[in-house]
Image: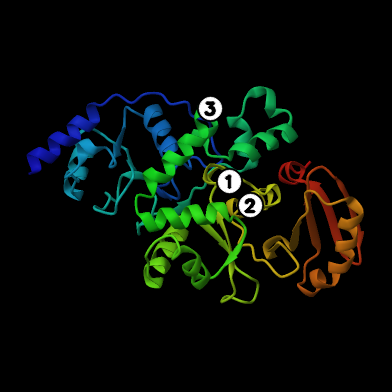
Amino acid sequence: MFWYNNTMLDWIRSQELKRTNFIPRRIELSETSLMLYGPPASGKSALLLDYAYEHSHDSLFIDLADIRLDGWRPSLEELELFCQKHKIHTLLIDNYDGSFPFPQDIRSFVASRDPYPTPFPLIRLLPPDFEESLAFLPTKLQGYPDQAFGQLLREGMLPEILLSQEGRRISRLQELIRLHLPDTLARTLFLFVARHTGHRFTIHQLYTRLKEKLRLSKDKLYEQTTLLEQRSMILACPKLGQPQAPKKLYPYDIGYTLAASPTRDPSKLIETLVMLELVKSNITPYYTDALDFVDFANDTAFLIQPFIPPEQIRGRIFRLYGDILALGLSRLVVITAGIDEEFDFEGVHCDIKPFWTWRLGM
């Protein structure tokens, strides 16, 4: 068995890595070992492959999803001996499944959909945020954030999709759903959330809705919901101070909403984008009956009002300032489709901005 495994490592080492169409992200692989985890098509493999290509002389890239490696996994001793023999300084393991440990004295960059326990830091990688996504768009759009926003609102922010042929994008998103969610319940749940993005549900309400489509138990539904949240495929926004209240649920990219339904609510799509931007900034948002999101880390409340006339927006702000102050917040951001103004009212700084202006700090 050792001979077979050692030969397999030699074969992996002999495979030529191809340069990818890599576009840098904020996160970089440097001197410290780490594990990247997160949902499919968020850019984990691209980061590892780019590093492996640039450091092919002293790194070893292993993709455990390669079906040619089915039935084979390296032992700790084999990895250590192989790396010593070939002067490997960096291990890059894609699609890690928790089946073996890593040598302590060799830098390791690991990618997985699940946050497996490792001796090095766990970093969740989600698809690019709005600012990062601009680099994946045609050059002619990159200087026009309002037009870029319009395209991203139609297609989402998955790098693979933005770089793919335009006429194939919806069908590719649907392929990703089938590929990464082979379990019928998991796929049905994810599609339901994508079609009802930003709506509020408890597990019982999900059960009531989904049992119309397939046979299931509450326990199984709870298990799948927890798993998809752990993998960040579904993002949940809890109600402030009421952990048992319905949570607002979102897919991890609006492209899935576009691929899952022939109809769409532009206001809910923009709300979803705001939720995703907050989560990608490592913020834990909440909602209240009056406010779409509350961000305590930045003392900020959010209202999503993309198609409301300015006078109605101001009227709503005046009615809500007491709620905002009661939460100890000092700022209100109102996301619009084009209105851009700011003012102070009763101790609250009000920013009324289009989505792209808010995200780019313009």
First along the sequence among labels 1 and 2: 1
Q: Which residue is mark 1?
A: 254
- Report the Cα–Cα distance between label 1 and label 2: 7 Å
Q: Which residue is mark 2?
A: 272
Image disc number at residue 190: none
Q: Residue at x 24, y 52 (%)?
A: 100
Q: Kindly indicate whether the residue at mark 2 contacts the one at mark 1 (C-beta within 8 angstroms).
A: yes
Q: Which residue is mark 3?
A: 167
Q: Is residue 158 above or below residue 313?
A: above
Name the secondary structure under disc 3: helix
Residue 295 seen from this side: yes
The answer to whether residue 200 is left or right of residue 314 is left
Name the secondary structure under disc 1: helix
The answer to whether residue 333 is left or right of residue 3 is right
Residue in the foreground of this view, choosing between 227 and 87: 227
Q: Identify the amino acid type marked 1.
A: Ile
Q: Kindly indicate whether the residue at mark 3 contacts the one at mark 1 (C-beta within 8 angstroms).
A: no
- Report the Cα–Cα distance between label 3 and label 2: 24 Å
Instruction: Give the percent coordinates (x, y) of residue 147.
Output: 72, 32
